[in-house]
Image: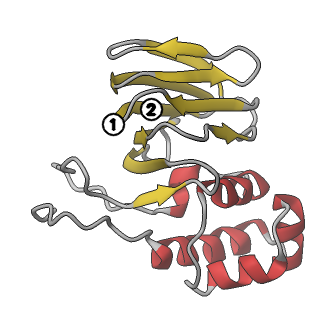
Amino acid sequence: MTEHDGAQPAPPQEAIAAALRRERARVGLSLTEVARRAGVAKSTLSQLESGVGNPSIETLWALCVALGIPFSRLLDPPRPRVQVIRAGEGPMLGASEADYRVTLLAAGPPNARRDIYRVSAEPGRPRLADPHSHGEVEHLILAAGRALAGPAEAPVLLEPGDYIRYPGDRPHIFEAREPGTWGVQVSEYG
């Protein structure tokens, strides 16, 4: 990776577009059917498959659930033997309703059942996540700040160094309580 120049990386639209086309073809579903299952407009999916638009995390998760794939498969990252991603670098995606960002750090290889992300958020609106794929479990270690995280019906206040494990296939929340809140999240697929 290159030295950090202060600019936020753009969402990886080309990789997402190629992955959406590939995965839709793999499961043999029409554009209309995937859009319907994901609860997104057909025109939105068409734009995303063309590499146009700035997709939110919520839209991409809904498409992953509709296609039955892990979120990381949309980013299709390279897998070098040694990889360094500096703080503030890497493909970053933002939430639509909260000051919440996620960067894929490591996608599990085809036979693995986990992906690793850096998550960051600022105080304000919480990120309320819809259920992900059946059997998914999320693990979170808070590195800095304070956050309310976990199941939407019973979130837990976390401080730096705290760990929480919760079902990712049920509604869940991440709400920063201090500026500069961030942590490491592992998504484990069932």
Instruction: Report the residue at 45% width, 32% height from top.
Output: 185
Q: Is residue 35 visible?
A: yes
**Residue 109 location (% of width, % of height):** 43, 46
Q: Residues within 10 Å of mark 2 (few under 14, many from 20)?
A: many
Residue 134 appears left or right of 113:
right
| Secondary structure beneath label 2 | strand
Location of residue 108 (image quadrant): top left
**Residue 13 location (% of width, % of height):** 49, 76
- Asked whether 146 or 104 is in front, the reply is 146
Q: Is residue 85 above or below residue 29?
A: above
The three-letter amino acid code for the residue at tag 2 is: Gln
Q: Is residue 190 visible?
A: no
The residue that disc 2 covers is 185
- Asked whether 38 or 21 is in front, the reply is 38
Instruction: Report the residue at 50% width, 41% height from top.
Output: 111
The residue that disc 1 covers is 180
Q: Is residue 169 above or below residue 111?
A: above
How far apart marks 2 and 1 lie (CA) works out to 16 Å
Q: Residue furthest left?
A: 3
- Asked whether 155 or 28 is in front, the reply is 155
| Secondary structure beneath label 1 | loop
Residue 154 appears left or right of 125:
right
**Residue 95 location (% of width, % of height):** 57, 53
